[in-house]
Amino acid sequence: MELGGFRLVRVLGEGGFGTAYLAEQLGLGRLAVVKVLRRALLESPRRDAILARFDTEVRAATRLQHPNLCTVYTVDRTSDGAPAVAMEFIDGEILRSRLERLAGHPMAVAELVPLFRQLVGVVRAVHAQRIRHGDLSPNNVMLTMDHDGQRLVKLVDFGIASLLDSSDADFAAGTPGYSAPEQFRGETTTASDLFGLGALLYWAATGHELFAGVAPEDIVAETNRWQLGANPHDVNPDVPAGLAALIRGLLDPAPGMRPSLDEILEELDALVTPHAKSVARRVLIVDGAEAIAPQVGAQLAPYGVRIAVTGDPRRATRSEGEFAAIVVNASLTAPRAGAIHAHLAEFLPDVPVLVVALGTAPVAWDDVPFRDRVRLPGGGYRLIELGETLRARRAAPTHAAAAAVSQTDGVPLATARTYLSGSQPTAAGHPTTGSGPTAAYESFLGAMPELLLELEAASGAPELPRLAERISGLARAARVREVEALATMIAALGDTGDLTDPTSLIADLSAAFIQSVRARAGLR
């Protein structure tokens, strides 16, 4: 049997889609691999769908060029009419062979990092062309040498790769143990490749396959039972914490919860950068029926922050370093948002937790500290400052102190932009202008108690917007941003007639004033 200018020499292996042959390119004497579609598939009732899918695979493979991809030479039919593709022969070993030779020991960091950097790079190139590989398994990663004698990773076998605008559930599964749960439901996406990367990293980091000891026929059922990704520390406690959190995230059964390729590269770099710290870049939103994710995501997107959304508060407490911050929907009642906040503050003391409410409806803040309350849209700047803080943490990972969310007048500080813009913080973190309080702040401090009483008395009255505008002006002059934002919101909603019950907002305003006074006095 021949394919164009290629003579088939011997069988290399069998797959669900076809047979791979070692071949010789006639006239050049160059070795190649020829993959031929199995005859049984051509005789099945799904023949037309299978041929269409083969064409899709070939289109995907031939349009990709990358140093870490197996090169496709030609696409044609064999001498007996079977669809086939000829591709580069790679002289090397599969990743499975390398990992098995480690005999249960983890791969050294000096080997793991460059290997997986190459692999992530080629997956990124594949995804950039709107293609998913679909079968990132240790048999489809080849290790060879380049012309300089350096290790070269080659990603092979687009046996189940397909374009994002095509789908065929019959061929969606890939390799059990390296395929994401959604692939067995025929819902393969590019996020499914992230799961495969996680399974490969798991083996390299721990020395053991993800489903070691599980019978092959039970792997699919075991994967579908997962609620969280497997924790590498259960097998090897010496896996660096950041890498373990990354792997656990990649193995999350929910595709939207998996880290990005950029996050993988950042974590790999942190492993080999002296004094570098692993820095999470994702924010988890514990959302409810009145979703806050669109608004929160819009505020954080410009800062390179990725959003993961869950309706299960338990996901937050099990994160173990996966998330840089957690945002809780204030409307949650079972359990209440305040209880979730208290639990997270206790078990994740180093992770900022904000409780976010939408609009003007009354909110049962419970015991949520004022500094952790956000009401949108007026408090959107709080999320912007969180985004700036997280971006600064990634830009300067060695400065751990700068990564913390500090507080001034109850509002998180980002980098140079604070709600006391223009003031210079002292070593204690409190603003100073000259040797004492500004006249504007004194005016604000003296007027606010009476104005708050008038505002409460005017609830629902025509003068309420004017009183709120006056408070907003005083707060702006005194540079107390939280009070200014809330007062501006009350005034605007009062003018448009959209403020049916201002009680909750007025309570927030009073709390903001009290918090600003306490912060000014050095209290919390």
Image (cartoon, rainbow, N blue to C red):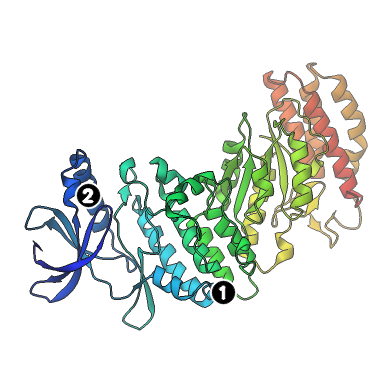
Q: Secondary structure at mark 1?
A: helix
485 vs 496: above or below: below
Q: In the image, which is nearer the foreground, mark 2 or mark 1?
A: 2
Given contact means CB atoms under 8 Å apart, are the residues at marks 2 and 1 in contact? no
Q: Secondary structure at mark 2?
A: helix
Which residue matches tag 1? 272
226 sits left or right of 520 in the view:
left
Which residue matches tag 2? 54
Distance of label 2 from label 1 (alpha carbons): 41 Å
Write down the quadrant of residue 508 in the picture. Answer: top right
Image coordinates of residue 214 in percent, x first then y, are 49, 56
Which amino acid lies under the numbered mark 1 shown in the image of this protein? Val
Q: Residues within 10 Å of mark 2 (few under 14, many from 20)?
A: many
The residue lying at 68 percent from left, 20 percent from top is 498
376 sits left or right of 4 in the view:
right
37 vs 5: above or below: above
Image coordinates of residue 74 in percent, x first then y, are 16, 61
263 sits left or right of 516 in the view:
left
Image coordinates of residue 41 in percent, x first then y, are 20, 47
468 sits left or right of 255 in the view:
right
Q: Work out whether residue 341 or residue 413 is closer to the camera in this orientation and state it.
A: 341
Q: How many marks?
A: 2
Image coordinates of residue 429 in percent, x first then y, are 83, 57
For the N terminus, the image quarter is: bottom left
Which amino acid lies under the numbered mark 2 shown in the image of this protein? Phe
